[in-house]
Each structure stands twice: as structure tokens, then as C-alpha cells.
Image (spheres, rainbow, N blue to C red):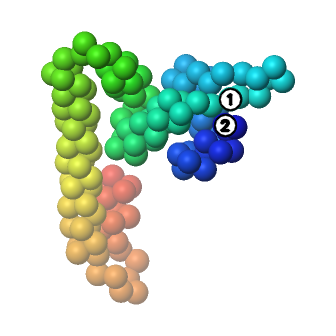
Amino acid sequence: MNIGDVSSQTGLPAKTIRYYEDIGLVKPLRDDNGYRRFRSQDVHKLNFLGRARALGFTIEDCRTLMALYEDETRASADVKKVARAHMAQIEAKIADLNAMRDTLSHLIDACAGDDRPDCPILQDLGGKA
């Protein structure tokens, strides 16, 4: 199957598929004319990668998860360790976003929003709060 077919089946852009090939995450066969020929296992790997990336795993995490997926002697504890580390990163980002929201909400509430030029939002951004 060609890259267009694989792109349709996986929902991944051809550029992303080529990138995953360039970094060694998938290795499609090549026809005599040099065109990529994807097998069903390549499509499966690309679906796996697409789902992992949609969950926010890094490329290196995806590489690790793919290796674990392909290793039938893996320990599920190793997979869980990768997922837990990623969850911790997500929770830290959420905490940062909550702090940003709280600060911005406070600044919005402090701003009169009228015709006067003084504005606590701009003062805070300018470091004058």
C-alpha cells in the first residue's frame, strides 16, 4: 500500500509518516522504483504512534513504548513507568495552567475596564504590580 493509502487509513499526514520513517519508528519496504510499500504491520505501528502522540507522549516515549510493545518478554511495570512519568508531566502542566488561569482571573477582576488609562493587567505585565 502506498503512503496516500496509509495516510487515509491512519489519519496521519504523509509528511508525518515520512518523518516517522526518517527517525526509524517505521521501516516500510521499498519497491524497485524507490516508492514506499507499507505493510499492515506498518499501518498498525502508525496507528499506535498516532494514538500515543495524541495522548501527548514524546517521540522518545513513543520509541520506548513501541519497543516495549514489540517485546513479548516485557514487564508491564516498564510500560506503567513510562505512562506514570507522562502523567506526572501532564499534571504539572495542568497545575501551571491553573496558576496562570488564577493569576489572569485576578488581574481581569482588578481591572475596571472603563475609559481610564490605568490598568492592573498592563501594570502586572510590565512588572509594576
- Quadrant where the C terminus sits is bottom left
Numbered badge on residue 124: none
Q: Is residue 73 above or below residue 56?
A: above
Q: Position of residue 105 (x, y in %)?
A: 24, 68
The kind of residue on which mark 2 rests is: Met
Residue 65 seen in this snapshot: yes
Residue 19 seen in this snapshot: no
- Identify residue for label 1: 37
- SS label for mark 2: loop
Name, please, the residue furthest toward the right.
Answer: 33
Q: Which residue is found at the position 31% from the left and 58% from the top?
A: 124
**Alpha carbon separation for disc pair 2 and 1:** 5 Å
Q: Which residue is found at the position 69% from the left and 44% from the top?
A: 4
- Quadrant where the N terminus sits is top right
Q: Position of residue 20 (x, y in %)?
A: 56, 29
Q: Is residue 51 above or below residue 33?
A: below
Q: Position of residue 103 (x, y in %)?
A: 23, 59
The kind of residue on which mark 1 rests is: Arg
Residue 120 located left or right of residue 29: left
Q: Is residue 122 above or below residue 26?
A: below
- Identify residue for label 2: 1
| Viewer-nearest residue: 128 or 25 | 25
Q: Which residue is found at the position 32% from the left and 16% from the top?
A: 71
